[in-house]
Image (tube, rainbow, N blue to C red):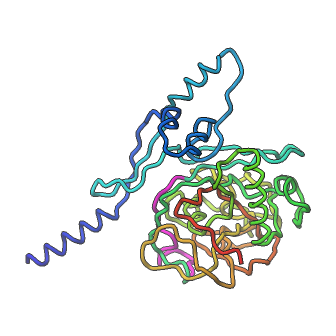
Amino acid sequence: MHRYFGFGYREDHEQLKNSFFEARRIVTQEWVEAAAESDSADKARELATGFDESGVLAEPLQSGNQTREQQTQEHRCREEPEYQFLNGLGEVIITYRGTPGSRKQFQLPPGNAATIWAARWIPPGRFSMGSSLFESDRESDEVLHRVTLTDGFFFSETPCTQAQWSLLMPHNPSKFRGANLPVEQVSWEDAREFARKLTEFHHQLGLISAGWSWDLPTEAQWEYACRVRKSGEFHGPIDSVAWYQLNSQKRTHPVGTRQPNDWGLQDMHGNVAKWCLDWYGQYPFEAVNHPVGQPFGTFRVYRGGGWSDAARCCRSAYRGRSVPDFRSSNIGFSLVLSDPLSGRRAAPTH
């Protein structure tokens, strides 16, 4: 009997340890003083010149009736929400600041009206990746497992459009032409080259801190951002959230014309499938932190399905795959902005 209760206690303890809930409070961030006390001169410089904790340049000081001293004082004490993820034992797993889904606008090279690259803040967290055995149309490679991402990142609000693409790349390869249509017929390699150029441009202008970079999302980042930590095939009724085989009229549609998820991300399901960073491989069965896929492989992953796909291929858990130089009018991409010191690491480029 003692042995039975002892086993039960250990099981309950482990369940509490692995449970997960979120607490929120408002804190005052005195970032100017914090910068002065920082051990890192680079960090102090970034904070003192207006970079926020995410590494993104804060809004510039506004001209008007206020003096610079008054504006600086306002920036010196800034209230913001702080979130903590705790387990059932009351232990803090992750702490972060920044409202989930908050929007940042990043400049693109001048040239036409599409000079803004918008992204949403995706907080750290834990979720179930893959699909339940009872999910309709599930595939055998969608093994359900727990994933923890202990660092947040920015995720582009929509897939890259042709107008955005054309500001950095020499030609538009898309089959369906339109400034606000998603760029397609881009390979995995093409998408990473765009990300490299966007990173270089933002570093030149000082819009993101040194070390931060744009890149394709890992599979885990994509599915976590798509699901908003929730289970289910889609983040809403498929005809409300996706352009797919039954409603697309056999073509792509302007981005952002379907219902966004709770973090403000659009076209996560349908319109075009989105390349991910990972090599395709089997999921683990055990819980993992910051998975980045296999170290090598034959196929790269794409997620979310596109205009020519059946509904089952647009599910949150569905995993498409192809060789890195494959191009299709059904495949485009989104990007993430993250810190290389986070748990996420870039996959090999070859």
Give the answer, above or below, for where 311 lies relative to 59.
Answer: below
Q: Quadrant of residue 318?
A: bottom right
Q: Is residue 127 magenta?
A: yes
Count of numbered marks: 0
Task: Measuring from the top left, give residue 241's x and y in whole percent.
Answer: 66, 58
Task: Measuring from the top left, give residue 147's x and y in whole percent.
Answer: 47, 67
| Span highlighted in magenta in the image | 123-139
Q: Residue at x 65, y 84 (%)?
A: 297
The foreground one among 5 and 338 is 338
Q: Residue at x 79, y 77 (%)?
A: 325
Q: Is residue 120 magenta?
A: no
Is 182 displayed left or right of 15 in the figure? right
Which residue appears farthest toward the left when viewing the image? Answer: 1
Give the answer, above or below, for where 205 lies relative to 231.
Answer: above
The foreground one among 221 and 64 is 64
Q: Magenta residues: mostly which secondary structure?
A: loop
Is 199 displayed left or right of 169 in the figure? left
Image quadrant containing the N terminus: bottom left
Q: Residue at x 64, y 54 (%)?
A: 212
Task: Measuring from the top left, give residue 304's x and y in whole percent.
Answer: 66, 67
